[in-house]
Structure formats: structure tokens, C-alpha cells
Amino acid sequence: MSTKQTAKKKPAAKKAAKQTKPKPATKKPRHVKILDHSACAVARALGKAGVKTAEADAIMRANGVEMSKASLSVQLGFGRNKDTWEKRGEPAPLTAAQIKELRQTAKQ
């Protein structure tokens, strides 16, 4: 037997079957918006308003955002410190009424 006969290529049908795997139907969206702003910008706005980590976590979860407590704590700190806004992004321009509304959603 020659080496050409022993080295067989895989059929093309198997390659095509691997490429057409169905995606899971229960996948959650990655980029959830809160009041038309990103979750991180809202977290920075909450930090700027003086909201503590536990309350901010409840607000995020009430709005469908699952953010680790460490990440949330960092974003709150960025919101409190104006020196980080240029590098890390400014907080979302939320009004006091919007922040109050967010706090109310967390209590429900």
C-alpha cells in the first residue's frame, strides 16, 4: 500500500455539519441598557450620587444586569472620583429624579 492510499481526507459533509451548530435559545443579551445608558455609566452615576454597593447591586439586578460586586464597586469608585472620568468615561447624565426612580425599582 502506498502512502497516498492510507492518508484519506475527511468527507466535506462532516465539516459542514460542525459549522451549522444551533445556538442556544436562552442566551441573554450582553449589553443591557438602563435609561438608554450602559450599565457601567449608570453605575458610575450611582457612585457620583453616593449610592453604596449593596443598594447599587439591588438596582442593577432589578434592571436585569448581572454585574459582579467587585466590578460594581470599581465602577462606583470611578463615579466618585472625578479624576478617573477622562480615562474611564463619564457617569451617565442622570437627573436626581431618575436616580430616585432607580432606587424605587430596587426596593420593589
Image (cartoon, rainbow, N blue to C red):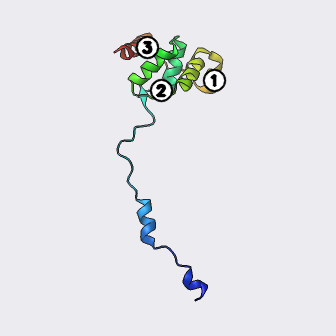
Write down the residue under mark 1: 86
Write down the residue under mark 2: 39
Name the mark nearer the viewer: 3 or 1. Answer: 3
Amino acid type at image mark 1: Glu
Q: At x 48% / y 22%, what residue is drawn?
A: 42
| Residue 90 appears anywhere in the view | no
Amino acid type at image mark 3: Ile
Q: At x 40% / y 59%, what residue is drawn?
A: 20
Quadrant in which residue 103 is drawn: top left
In this picture, is 108 found above or below 89? above
Which residue ends up furthest to the right in the rendered image? 83
Q: Horizontal and vertical percent for residue 78?
A: 60, 20
Amino acid type at image mark 2: Ala
Q: Mark 3 vs mark 2: which is more N-terminal?
A: 2
Element marked by disc 2: helix
Element marked by disc 3: helix
82 vs 52, left or right, is right
Which residue ends up furthest to the front in the rendered image? 1
What is the crowding at mark 3: few (fewer than 14 residues within 10 Å), some, or many (at least 20)? some
